Structures are given as C-alpha cells and as structure tokens.
Image (cartoon, helix red, strand yellow):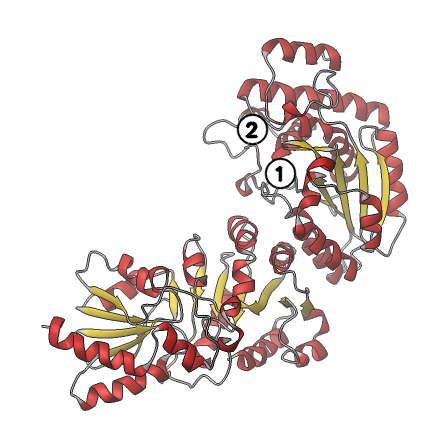
C-alpha cells in the first residue's frame, strides 16, 4: 500500500505542482522518484511531527497542498493539538497519511501500533477519516482528499505492504462498500486490510450454509445518512478492526445505528496493549483477530441469537 | 514610516485602550499586552499597514487585545468591533478567532508554541513562489519553553528562511512567575545563534532601539532572524510594571484613572 501511495502521489504531483509531500524522516528510498524529479515537492521535516503539521498548515495558507506522511501513531498522537487547532479549527487543509496503521508494525511493539487513531480523530469535528482496504480504495481516497475544496482536512489510514486487492468495482466516497452480498440479515463489517482474514472464515461459514454479508467500511467519518440507510436492514453486525473497539468502528457503528435496533458486536475484544512480539498474524491473534475466531463466534452465536 | 515621537504617542493611546478594555470586561493578560505594545505599534505602523507583502502572526495569542487596540487606533478595526472585545457572542476574544478574517489576524492561537511553525510554513511558501515580503511573528519568552519552537528553529534554519522574523517579547515573566526561575531559557541569544539564526537584541519598549535593530537584521540575507526584545511586563503604568499579578488581574476604576494620568491621555 505504501509503495502504491508513493507511485500514485508521484503521478499526482506530476499533474499538480502545488502538492508538497512532507515526511517526518520516514520512507527510506520510498520517495526517491519524487525527490529526483520534483525536488521542490518533497521535504523531510525531521523527527518533529508537531512542527511538521503546523508548518503544513502554514504552507496550506500560502496556497499549497500539503500531504503529511509518517507512521500513524507519531503522525496523530504526537500532533493531535496541531491537527485540531492549526489544520481543522484554522481551516488549513492538510492530507494526513498515516502508514503502518493498526498492527502493521507488529514486531516493533505497542509504541508502533496504532489502536486509538480512529477514536482520537473521530472526536474532532469536520475531519474526514478514510481507511483503505486495498490500493483501489487508496487511489480513490487520495484523489478525493486532494480534490476537496472546502479546506477539509482528511486522514488516510494506510497499512504497510502487499495487501491483496479486494474491490471488484471502484469504491465510492460517502458510501459503504459491500464486498460480499448474500442478502443476509447478518454482516461482518471491517476496516483496513483485513479482508483476507474474513474471507477464510467465510469459506468455512459458507460450507456450513451460513450466509453473511461482508462490508468494507472504507470511509469512517463522516458517517453519512446513505451509509446508515444501507446498514439499517441488518439484525446483527460483527465488526473487525485493528483498533480498540469502543472508540473504533464498533463504537462508531453502535452510536450511529443506536435507534435502529441492530446488535453491534466486536470480534476483536481485547482492550490492552499487545506486548508480545511476532508476525502480524500472531499479534492480530493476540488482539482477537483471526479467521478461526470469526468462524467460531459466528457459528456459536447463530445457534443462540440469530433467530 | 512614522517617526519615533509619533510612534510613542500612538503607543500611549494603544496602551490606554487596552487598559480600559480590561477594566470594562474584567479580562486578564494585561501585563503581557502592555509589554508588547511598542513592538506591535512599530511593526504594524511601519511594516504592515504600508506593505501588503508583509505578514504578521501573533503567536502569544493571549495578547490579542493589544493587536485589536493597535488596529483600532489605526482605524483598521471599527469601534463596534473593538468594544465587542470579550463580549458574549463576539469573535474578538482574549485569543483571536479565525472568524475575524482580518488581513492582520487570520491565524487563531492560544496554545503556545504554534506561531513560529505556522509562520515558517508561510515563509517557505513565499520562498518557493519567489514572492516578496517578510513574516513577522510575535512570541513570548514563556513560549521558549515549548519544544515546537525549537523544532521550528531547526527546520527554518535548514530551509534558510531569511524572510522569517521572530520577535521575542522578553518581559522576563510568564504565567506564574519569573521565566528564568520556571525554566531557565538563558542564554537566549547564544541558543538561537547556535540553531543557525541571525540574532539581535534591543529594548523592545524603545522605538528607536527596536527600529534600528530591525533595520540592522534585515540587511542579513541568508538566515532566519530573531529580535530578542527586552521589555517590561506592565510597561507604561508604574504600579503594573514588573508586578506579575497583572498577568491575571484587571484594574479598578481608580487604577484606570491613575493609568490615564500616567499615560498622559486627555
């Protein structure tokens, strides 16, 4: 995803020299092409994220289109006041791109996991939160973020690399993306690059004649009325995310659907830092994310709650 | 360009209007507004009103009243707006609101340590667009506690932002006491020099001293600039000078009258 981001942004800078990519000393060699061909459109601001954000607000005021890129937890947690005051409150548009979101940096431990960023930013008014599941989402998100004209700051929550392509058709801004439609009353809603994990569980579920819909929540904020309308038919929604559920999409769905008599449950139920190091799959499992767990929960619940 | 005598007269009027507002609205931050009055009067009258390419950023947002007062005296702000200061529903608060949308107040501050970073962004955009003009940023000495100021000092130096002029209102106090007792920022001059900035020091309550320092530093063409302006908190009224209680308190009717006499306002 990050390689695709670098390539896509290169093409966009080629067409629009107002775009300036700011990095906080991350992306070794990733942006070499931009640096070489468009040296004025790249600036390494050093490991000083809050300054990078306010500096970006300043260049936005000066007529440019800043894209701030670094590891998600440094980009968001270190700079939350700068994002709030200097970008959003003062209406200086920045495209925030967090890389290695969720548990992408599984082996680097909790200082590099971002399990709170959606909740933190969802608290802020007027920001747009986009969470691509694959490169086709990302392309649409990047295009949209750069084109927004009302000084709206956007946040794009990137994974890391080698995420499989899941979208058969182009995702649409302000709408949910139904990846699998079984006309079910039950849906699994996920955000970010988690489809492969759900797909495995779903194969087993289908073998047992259990049909669910699978929805990619690629836009988290604003949570539009079209999104609510598309979801109101469900009786039960299971959520899956590399984020603490209370403030992540589980919490956001619960609050937006609170008057719709829909049960919203999170498959990942762990609310603590995962200090065990390991592969992304291993750390996900520790956090409550695995295809086995999805399968087991849904099979068990079907017998209890579905009818 | 207004001469020093004219600027001094304006400073007195601006000071009195500030004090009157804090009396009327029972608002705070009077001491810091009075310490930076001369700097603002100087910059606005001699470098902003007559030059559209120059820009100003108030990083010490809690002294917005001093800027309103300078704009009001120069007839760049209506009486109605100036007297709406700190009223219910007004955008002219103790910190400036982005809703003000004035050429001179377009960035809302309040949390310290943001102005230099923001101003350096504007300065950088001017440079890559090859546009004329300088960015003046007023910061407090208390702000020198903030890490972001130093992050920005590094980046601005790397980018050789010679159109960036930071002015420190060095009144030696911050919210709860003497700056150097709370977090020693000395030697300020050497610190900034070592970060790759051009540095001058001046008496920020003396127009002649400030103007000549600014003139001198503007001659340098390679680096970002900082003017360490030594000032007196509460400047202009004897019983307010160097008394940090005036960071929070507002004057009584009698104190307002005494201020008027001391400033020679008729």
* Residue B197 x %, y %: 82, 52
Q: Is residue B189 above or below residue A36?
A: above
In this view, the residue farthest toward the front is A276
Q: Label 2 is found on which chain of the structure? A: B
Q: Nearer the viewer, residue A146 or B1?
A: A146
Quarter of the image for residue B12 reads top right
* Quarter of the image where the N terminus of chain B is located: top right
* Residue A277 x %, y %: 48, 77
Judging from the image, what secondary structure is the residue with disc 1 in?
helix
Residue under circle 2?
B81
Between the C-alphas of marks 1 and 2, the distance is 18 Å
* Residue B204 x %, y %: 80, 32
* Quarter of the image where the C terminus of chain B is located: top right
Could you tell me if residue A171 is visible in this image? no
Q: Which sits earlier in the primary sequence, circle 1 or circle 2?
A: 1
Q: Residue at x 41, y 82 (%)?
A: A281
Quarter of the image for residue A45 reads bottom right
Could you tell me if residue B191 is visible in this image? yes
Q: Label 1 is found on which chain of the structure? A: B
Pointer 2 local density, CA inside 10 Å: few below 14, some 14–19, many at least 20: some
Residue under circle 1?
B61
Judging from the image, what secondary structure is the residue with disc 2 in?
helix
Q: Is residue A236 above or below residue A8?
A: above
Q: Nearer the viewer, residue A149 or B165?
A: B165
How many labels, in total? 2
- Is B11 on the left-hand or right-hand side of A12? right
């Amino acid at each position: 995803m990050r390689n695709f981001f670098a390539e896509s942004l290169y093409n966009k800078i080629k067409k629009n020299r107002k775009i300036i990519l700011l990095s906080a000393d991350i992306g070794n060699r990733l942006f070499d092409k931009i640096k070489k061909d468009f040296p004025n459109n790249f600036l390494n601001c050093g490991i000083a994220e809050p300054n990078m954000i306010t500096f970006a607000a300043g260049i936005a005021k000066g007529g440019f289109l800043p894209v701030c890129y670094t590891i998600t937890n440094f980009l968001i947690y270190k700079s939350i006041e700068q994002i709030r005051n200097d970008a959003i409150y003062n209406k200086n548009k920045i495209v925030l791109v967090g890389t290695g979101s969720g548990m992408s940096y599984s082996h680097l431990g909790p200082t590099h996991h971002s399990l709170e960023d959606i909740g933190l930013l969802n608290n802020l008014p007027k920001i747009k939160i986009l969470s691509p599941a694959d490169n086709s989402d990302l392309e649409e998100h990047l295009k949209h973020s750069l084109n927004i004209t009302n000084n709206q700051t956007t946040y794009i929550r990137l994974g890391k690399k080698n995420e499989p392509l899941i979208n058969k058709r182009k995702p649409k801004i302000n709408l949910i993306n139904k990846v699998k439609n079984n006309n079910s009353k039950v849906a699994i809603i996920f955000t970010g690059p988690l489809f492969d994990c759900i797909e495995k569980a779903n194969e087993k579920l289908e073998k047992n004649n259990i049909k669910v819909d699978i929805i990619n929540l690629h836009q988290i904020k604003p949570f539009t009325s079209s999104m609510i309308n598309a979801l109101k038919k469900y009786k039960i929604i299971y959520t899956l995310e590399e984020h603490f559920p209370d403030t992540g999409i589980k919490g956001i769905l619960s609050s937006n659907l609170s008057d719709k008599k829909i049960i919203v449950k999170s498959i990942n139920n762990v609310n603590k830092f995962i200090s065990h190091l390991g592969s992304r799959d291993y750390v996900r499992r520790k956090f409550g994310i695995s295809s086995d767990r999805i399968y087991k929960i849904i099979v068990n619940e079907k017998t209890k709650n579905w009818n | 360009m207004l001469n020093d005598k004219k600027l001094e007269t304006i400073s007195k009027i601006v000071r009195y209007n500030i004090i009157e507002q804090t009396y009327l609205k029972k608002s705070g931050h009077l001491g810091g507004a009075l310490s930076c009055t001369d700097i603002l009067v100087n910059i606005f009258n001699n470098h902003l009103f007559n030059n559209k390419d120059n820009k100003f950023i108030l990083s010490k947002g809690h002294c917005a009243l001093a800027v309103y007062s300078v704009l009001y005296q120069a007839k760049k702000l209506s009486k109605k707006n100036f007297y709406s200061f700190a009223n219910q529903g007004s955008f002219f608060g103790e910190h400036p609101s982005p809703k003000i949308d004035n050429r001179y107040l377009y960035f809302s501050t309040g949390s310290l340590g943001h102005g230099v970073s923001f101003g350096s962004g504007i300065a950088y955009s001017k440079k890559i667009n090859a546009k004329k003009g300088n960015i003046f940023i007023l910061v407090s000495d208390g702000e020198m506690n903030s890490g972001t100021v130093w992050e920005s000092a590094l980046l601005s130096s790397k980018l050789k932002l010679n159109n960036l002029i930071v002015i420190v209102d060095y009144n030696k106090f911050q919210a709860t006491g003497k700056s150097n007792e709370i977090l020693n920022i000395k030697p300020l001059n050497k610190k900034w020099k070592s970060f790759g900035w051009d540095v001058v020091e001046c008496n920020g309550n003396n127009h002649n001293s400030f103007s000549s320092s600014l003139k001198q530093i503007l001659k340098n063409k390679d680096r970002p600039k900082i003017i360490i302006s030594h000032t007196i908190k509460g400047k202009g009224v004897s019983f307010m000078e160097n008394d940090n209680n005036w960071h929070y308190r507002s004057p009584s009717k009698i104190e307002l009258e005494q201020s008027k006499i001391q400033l020679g306002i008729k």
